[in-house]
Amino acid sequence: MTAGPDHDRHQVEPHADRRKRLDLEPDTVERDLIKLVLTVVELLRQLMERQALRRFDEGDLTEEQEERVGLTLMLLEDRMAELRDRYGLRPEDLNLDLGPLGPLLPRD
């Protein structure tokens, strides 16, 4: 008897194939989604902060604008810390490893 298509379906998957699959456990889906969203928000926050610092250095902003931008960035950083705490995440948990490209977020 030869092995048909049904036989292949019942074989154990090689380790490499299992790593490519998403872990869709009900207990971790919400936390993983929050982690992804917070990672994107953190990336944008850091980009906005760098842009603001560049504009501060160049003198492009009025004193009132500098104050408003600084306050907004501080509030956003505080809110990010609250959300990380709520979901048991550390700042380094939001830094995705991009393989040969290195980490997504700069390490301070």
Image: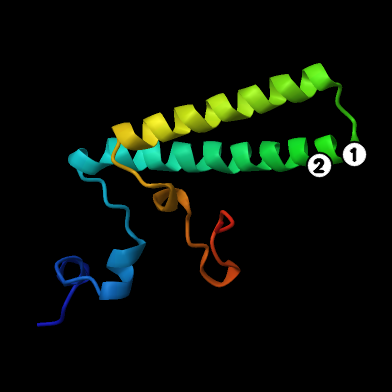
Amino acid on which the number 2 mark rests in the picture? Arg
Based on the displayed image, in which of its 4 quarters is residue 64 positioned? top right
Q: Is residue 81 left or right of residue 4?
A: right
Q: Position of residue 87 (x, y in %)?
A: 30, 36
Tags 2 and 1 touching, CB below 8 Å: yes
Q: Nearer the viewer, residue 43 or 71?
A: 71
Other-residue count near label 1 (Cα within 10 Å), few / some / many at <14 / 14–19 / ≥20: few
Based on the displayed image, in which of its 4 quarters is residue 49 positioned? top right
Determine the CA span between mark 2 and mark 1. Answer: 6 Å
Give the residue displayed 26% in from the left and 74% down from the top: 15
Residue at far left of view: 1
> Label 2's element?
helix
Q: Position of residue 89 (x, y in %)?
A: 34, 43
Q: Quadrant of the image for the N terminus?
A: bottom left
Check disc 2 and report the residue beneath it. 54
Give the residue displayed 56% in from the left and 67% down from the top: 102
Residue at far bottom of view: 1
Q: Is residue 34 left or right of residue 61?
A: left
With respect to residue 44, does 90 lie above or below?
A: below
Q: Nearer the viewer, residue 22 or 54?
A: 54
Give the residue displayed 28% in from the left and 65% down from the top: 18
